[in-house]
Image: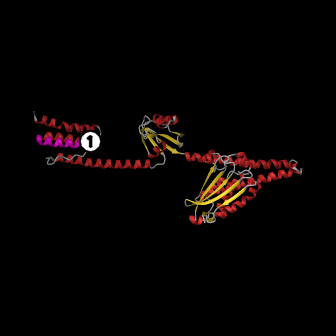
Amino acid sequence: MPLRFTLLALLVPPLLVATLLVLFGHPAGALAAGLVTLAGSALALGTSRVAMERQLRALTQKTQSLAAGVDVAPPKGLERTDDLAQLEDAIDTLDDQLSMRAAALNQEARILTAVLDGMAEGLWVTDAEGTVVRHNDALAEMLRPARGAIVGQRPLALIRNEALNDAVARACHEGASTRLELTLEGLYSRTLAVRVTPVGRDLPGSAAVFHDVTELRRLEKVRKDFVANVSHELRTPITAIRGYAETLQGGALQDTQVAPKMVEIIHRQSERLSELVEDLLELSRLEAREMTFQRTEVPLALAVSRAAEGVRPKAEGKNQQIGLHVPPGLVALGDGRAIEQVLLNLLDNAVKYTPAGGRVDVDGAYEGGRCVVRVRDTGVGIEPKHLSRIFERFYRVDKGRSRDMGGTGLGLSIVKHLMGAMDGEVKVESQPNAGSTFVIFLPSAAGPTAATG
C-alpha cells in the first residue's frame, strides 16, 4: 500500500475528532482545524510512518479527553515534531482556559444559589411545559409538600389552585404576567401573594415569586375590627346622650320627675364615653411604646391593698367579701403605677362579674423565680372557647351584659400590654359557673425566703 494511503488511514481518528469539534462549535474547533492542516502537511513532508502514527495517536487521545472534559497527560518519551509540539501546547493552553472558565461558572452558580436561598420570598422556575425545574429554600418552607420533592412537579400537584396553574400556563405559552393571592389550608394556614412572569430573554418557561402576607392580612383585619368596634362603642353613649338631651329640649326639662333621671343618664353615659376615650389613648400609647416605665422594687402586698381600696365601695354595695393573702416580703421588679393599674383592672372585673354575696380573693406567692399573684372570684366564669381571645380589644363574652355593667372592653387588653412592657405575663383559668382566676407573673426582686416571710 502506498505511503500516503497508509498515513491517511492513520489520520482518520484525529480528522474525525477535528471535524466533530468544528461542527459542534467547540472552543477547540480552531485548534482542531489546525490539526487537520498539520496532518496534511505531514503527509506532504512524508513524515515517518511509525513516528507519525504515535504522535497522531497521542494528540487524538489528548483532543478526545479535552472534548470530554478529562485531563490526560501525554505518554512519556514521545518523540514530537515542532508542528505537533506547538499544537499540543496550544491544546494544553486551551485546556487551562476552559478549566478556569468552568471554575468561574461554578462560582457564579454557587453565588446565585446562595442569593436565592437567602431570600425571604419563595421562588420557583418552570420549563416551557410548566414543570418546576428550580426553587429556593423559602419556597420549600412555605409549601412543605407531602411528597417531599418540588422539582419535577407541576403547579397543580403542589398547590391545588386552578388560578395559579392557569397563570403558569399563560406565562409559558403567551408570555403574560399575573398577580394573584391564594390561601394554603392546613394546620397553620397561610396567605400568599404570587406574581407569575415569563422567564424572559428568549428563554422558555416561567418564574413565580411567593410573598407570605399572612401577618399583613391579619393586621389589616385587626385594624378593620378595631375601627368597627370603636365606632360601635362610641355610638352607644353618644346616641344616649343625644337622645335624652333632645328630649329635655323638647319640654321634658320642665318635668321635675323625669328631668333629673334623664340628666343622671346623660351624666353616666358621658362618664362612660370619657373612660372609653381614656382607655383608647392609653392603649394607643402602650402599643406605640410611648409610655416610660420605671423599674423599681414594688411590694405587692401594698399594691394589692391600694387596688382593693379602689373597688371596695362597689364590692360592699353588692355585699361581697374581698380577701387579701399576699405576704409582705413578696417584692416584684416593675413600675409601681402600672402594677397597681393591672391589679385594679383585675379586681374591678372580678367584682363586676361576681353576683351579690360572692367573694373575691387575692393570693400572692414566689414560684419558679417569679412573683405570682392570683385574683380569684366566685363569679359566672368563662366558657373555654372564649379564653384564647379574652385579652383582645373590645372582646366581650356577653356583649349586652358587659356593656350594661359599664365596661369599655379594653381593660384586659391594657392589662396584657402593661404586663408585657414589664417583662411579665398574664393568664386566665376559668370554667362556666365556677368562677375565674386571673394570674399575673412578675420578675422578683427578692428570694423565696423574703417573699414568704
193 or 179: nearer the eye? Answer: 193
Horizontal and vertical percent position of residue 87: 20, 46
Count of marks, rendered view: 1
In the rendered image, residue 11 lying in the magenta stretch gets the answer: no
Residue 276 shows up from this direction: no
Label 1: which residue?
68
Quarter assignment of residue 60 = top left
Displayed quadrant of residue 140: top left
Please provide percent x and percent y for residue 158: 47, 37
Name the outermost residue toward the top: 1
> Which residue shows up at 45% across the image and 50% down it?
118
Viewer-nearest residue: 131 or 158: 158
Relative to residue 166, is residue 228 depicted above or below?
Answer: below
Displayed quadrant of residue 418: bottom right
Amino acid type at mark 1: Ala
Q: Tell me the quarter of the image containing the N terminus.
A: top left
Coloring scheme of the render? secondary structure
- Residues in magenta? 46-67
Residue drawn at x 51%, y 41% as measured from the top left: 194
Task: Residue 420: give x, y in percent of width and height.
Answer: 59, 57
Q: Residue at x 79, y 54 (%)?
A: 267
Residue 383 in view, yes or no = yes
Q: Is residue 40 above or below residue 309?
A: above
Q: Percent from the top left, x then y, of residue 389?
A: 62, 48
Q: Nearer the viewer, residue 60 or 143?
A: 143
- As helix, strand or loop, the secondary structure at mark 1 comes to helix
**What secondary structure do most residues of the magenta stretch adopt?**
helix
> Looking at the figure, which quarter contains the C terminus?
bottom right
